[in-house]
Amino acid sequence: TVADSNVEPEGHLRVHTLNEIGRRYLIPLIADYRQTFPLVTFDLTLENRIPDLGTEGFDVSVSITPNLNSQWVSRNVGATYSVLCASPDYIAHRGMPQVPEDLAGHECIRPFDDPASTRDSSTFEGPYGTVNLYIPPSDFHLNTSDGLVEAVSSGLGIGCIPAFVAAEHLADGRLIR
C-alpha cells in the first residue's frame, strides 16, 4: 500500500543485531535505504547477545539463531555456516588435521561460548557425514568472531569461524581452511 501511495516512509526504527552482521551487512543496507528514504531514522545496537524484544523496545532484531519466542514474528532471510580455520604458522608447527577426530590433538578455540560453559562436544557435517566429537577445552576463550579471527590468525589454534567472516582472511592467505 505504501509503495503505491504518495506517502514517503518516515519514522524511527530501533534495530538490534550481532556485531559482525551489523558491520558487514546492516550498516551498508541502512545507508542505501536512507538515501532513498531520508525521513526514516535508525538506532542500531550492535552486540553479541539476543535481546528481549518485549522489554528492551527494539522493533526488529537480526540474528543467526532461530526465533524461539512464538509471540514474535520471524522470517528466515538467509543461511550461513562456519569453517574450521588456522593460520599457516599454526599448521606448519602442529600439522593439518585430516579428519575431524584429529582435532583432539589441537588447540581448538571456541567462538561465542561462555568460557564457563561445560559444552565440550561439537557437531561437524562434511564428506564424512555428521560427526559428533569431543573437543578438549581450550586455554583461551573469547566471544566475538572478529576476536576469534585475530586469535586464529595469530596462531593460537584452530577456530570455527562463520564463513562470511573468514572469507577475506582465507582469500588473502592469513587463514587456511
Image: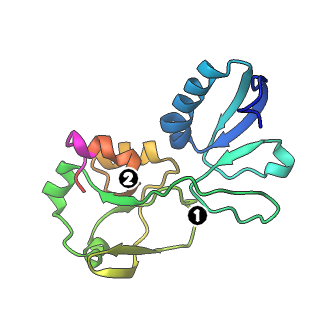
Q: In the figure, 37 relative to 85: above or below?
A: above
Badge 1 or badge 2: first in the primary sequence: 1
Q: Which mark is residue 116?
A: 1
In the rendered image, which quarter is residue 153 located in?
top left
Evaluate whether residue 174 shows in this view. Answer: no
| Magenta stretch holds residue 172 | yes
Between marks 1 and 2, how big is the CA–CA gap?
25 Å
Task: Residue 19 in the image: state x and y as whole percent.
Answer: 55, 40
Front in this rendered view, residue 60 or 93 = 60
**Prevailing secondary structure of the magenta residues:** loop
Q: Residues within 10 Å of mark 1 (few under 14, many from 20)?
A: few
On-image quarter of the N terminus: top right
Q: Which mark is residue 163?
A: 2
163 relative position to 79: left or right: left
The residue located at (43%, 68%) in the rendering is 137
The residue located at (67%, 32%) in the rendering is 44
Q: Which residues are magenta?
A: 170-175
Q: Are marks 1 and 2 in contact (CB under 8 Å)?
A: no
Evaluate whether residue 142 shows in this view. Answer: yes
Q: Mark 1 or mark 2, which is nearer to you?
A: 2
| Magenta stretch holds residue 171 | yes
Task: Residue 129 in the image: state x and y as whole percent.
Answer: 33, 81
Front in this rendered view, residue 27 or 176 = 27
Q: Amino acid at mark 1?
A: Ala
Q: In the figure, 40 relative to 81: above or below?
A: above
Task: Residue 56 in the image: state x and y as whole percent.
Answer: 82, 44
Q: In the figure, 102 relative to 60: above or below?
A: below
Task: Residue 148 in the image: state x and y as whole percent.
Answer: 41, 48
Q: Residues within 10 Å of mark 2 (few under 14, many from 20)?
A: some
Q: Amino acid at mark 2?
A: Ala
Q: Which mark is residue 89?
A: none
The residue located at (56%, 38%) in the rendering is 22
